[in-house]
Image: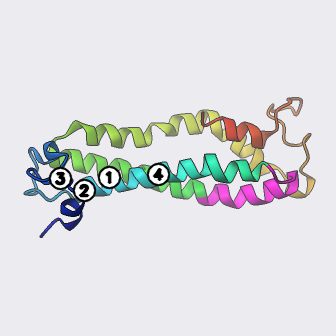
Amino acid sequence: MVDLLGICLGFGHPKLGLLPWIHKGSRAGGTMVLSYLALTVAALFTGAAFYINFAEQPARLRLDDRGLLTQWKPAYKRGFVMQASLAVLGFLFGAAAWWQTGVMGFLAGGLLMLSNWPYTLIVLMPTNNALMASDPAKADAKTRVSSKNGTGSMPLARRWALLPY
């Protein structure tokens, strides 16, 4: 099977490509499908994160409190499923590409795809849960505060936007 993407982009072919070291030790006779899939999933994950942080969330913060929560809740549910799926797929494809090629960079990339999970579960999840528990009809600056007892000063939606950094 001709690796048309690799030939067109100049990647992966030992004589033509920019990354001939990827094929070193390949167990599939030069076919780099898993490597391309790992890189594609990592790029999709990165693109989604970039979009959320630089386009969607800043636009959402311009909405009134009710509109913000109304928009955030379904977007968060869909985004959570999408990014969790991409993280798992990125790890699996990265690990498989490492097994296929012996290139440690694929395994490292796959592990990096999962490395945000502890941070998400420990740091982000309390804010996410508080936002999900908020009733958009009753949303105001006082009901969306950062502390558990309701006496904090930073709105949860703004805190959510800052936490990934």
Q: CA distance from mark 4 to mark 3?
A: 22 Å
How far, Cα to Cα, is label 3 from label 1? 14 Å
Nearest the eye: 80 or 57: 57
Q: In whole angstroms, how far apart are the C-alphas of marks 1 and 4?
A: 11 Å
**Badge 3 vs badge 2, beta-carbon distance below 8 Å:** no
Total marks placed = 4
Q: Nearer the viewer, mark 3 or mark 2?
A: 3
User: Which mark is drawn over residue 12?
Assistant: 3
Q: Is residue 32 left or right of residue 65?
A: left
Specify the segment rendered in magenta: 62-78
Residue type, numbered disc 1? Ala
- Disc 3/disc 2 C-alpha distance (Å): 12 Å
Disc 2 marks a residue whose amino acid type is Leu
Q: Give the quarter of the figure containing the C terminus.
A: top right
The residue under label 4 is which amino acid type?
Phe
Q: Residue at x 55, y 57 (%)?
A: 81
Three-letter code for the amino acid on which mark 3 is drawn: Gly
Would residue 96 be counted in the magenta stretch?
no
Marks 4 and 2, how far apart in space? 16 Å
User: Of circles 4 and 3, which is in front?
Assistant: 3
Q: Is residue 108 above or below residue 34?
A: above
Q: Are marks 4 and 3 in contact (CB under 8 Å)?
A: no
What residue is disc 4 on? 45
As drawn, is 23 to the left or to the right of 82?
Answer: left
Q: Which residue is mark 1?
A: 38
In the image, is residue 76 part of the stretch drawn in magenta? yes
Mark 3, residues whose alpha carbon is within 10 Å: few (<14), some, or many (≥20)? Answer: many
> Between disc 1 and disc 4, whose residue precedes?
1
Q: Which residue is mark 2?
A: 34
